[in-house]
Amino acid sequence: MPRVASLIAMMAALSPGFAQSAPTQRPARAFQIITANLPLPEAGKPYSVQLRAVGGRPPYRWSVPTGALPLGLNLDPGSGAISGTPQSNNEFSVLVQVTDSSSPPLYQTKLLVASAEAPLTVRWTAVPQIALSNIVGGVRVKNGTRDVVDMTVIVVAVNEIGKAFALRYEHLMLASGAETPDLQFNSSLPLGQYTVHADAVGEVPAKKAIYRDRREVAGLIVQSQ
């Protein structure tokens, strides 16, 4: 699991402008797959889910670089729709890849899991709010997988010009079905309007699996010091 140096790089990807001087314009959104997980299939019943990506240069091209979808399901490369009639009710995971139309093209891959419960679930225990010049709140993350997950949780506040401020960082091993402690934050920030997001990244090295989830609150305004 990446540590401090890699963490900064990851934050740069999640929040353009992190660890940079204030830009003159709002940065473009990072190219990424934003589909969090897939619905559980029901044998013999029509199945349809739309994969989604943001950033980069549309149109996108979708593929399954390794492995395959369960019998009865297919991925449309142009639309990113997974559809068909599955032949079983079993949980499954699939590695999907999206390529944009840049020259040279950008690409992103992500492991998506179809299960009754999301692999990772981020929830606010205290929705972020302003207290004088501070942003305060709390967050927990639940491990919905059947594995022990190497978990990193990062809470950042991004202002109106794209500069990001870390509010909370936590790294821990999280057992199957377990939830993190209440990760509280209370940080004084410069004047400005902020969007706060909590990102959870979990890794299961033995399966080469990486799971993510995010929660976001916008429109928080620090008006005094």
Image (tube, rainbow, N blue to C red):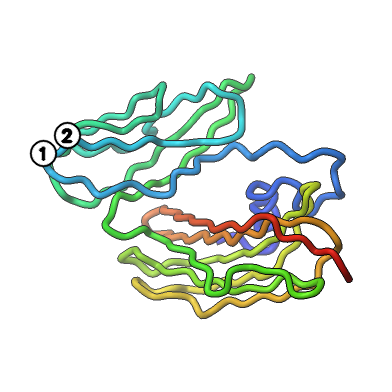
Q: Residues within 10 Å of mark 1 (few under 14, many from 20)?
A: few
Q: Quadrant of the N terminus?
A: bottom right
Left or right of residue 24: residue 220: left
Q: Amino acid at mark 2?
A: Thr
Q: Secondary structure at mark 1?
A: loop
**Lower sequence index among marks 1 and 2:** 1
The answer to the question of whether label 1 and label 2 lie on touching residues, with beta carbons closer than 8 A, is yes
Q: Amino acid at mark 1?
A: Gly
**Which numbered circle lies on residue 195?**
none
**Which numbered circle lies on residue 44?**
1
**Which numbered circle lies on residue 85?**
2
Distance from Cα at disc 1 to Cα at disc 2:
6 Å
Picture layout, residue 121 above or below residue 136: above
Number of marks in picture: 2
Q: Quadrant of the C terminus?
A: bottom right
Choose between 119 and 136: the one closer to the eye. 136
Choose between 165 and 135: the one closer to the eye. 135
x, y percentage for residue 32?
Answer: 55, 40
Picture layout, residue 151 above or below residue 97: below
Picture layout, residue 208 above or below residue 141: above
Q: Residue at x 50, y 25 (%)?
A: 60
Q: Residue at x 18, y 51 (%)?
A: 90
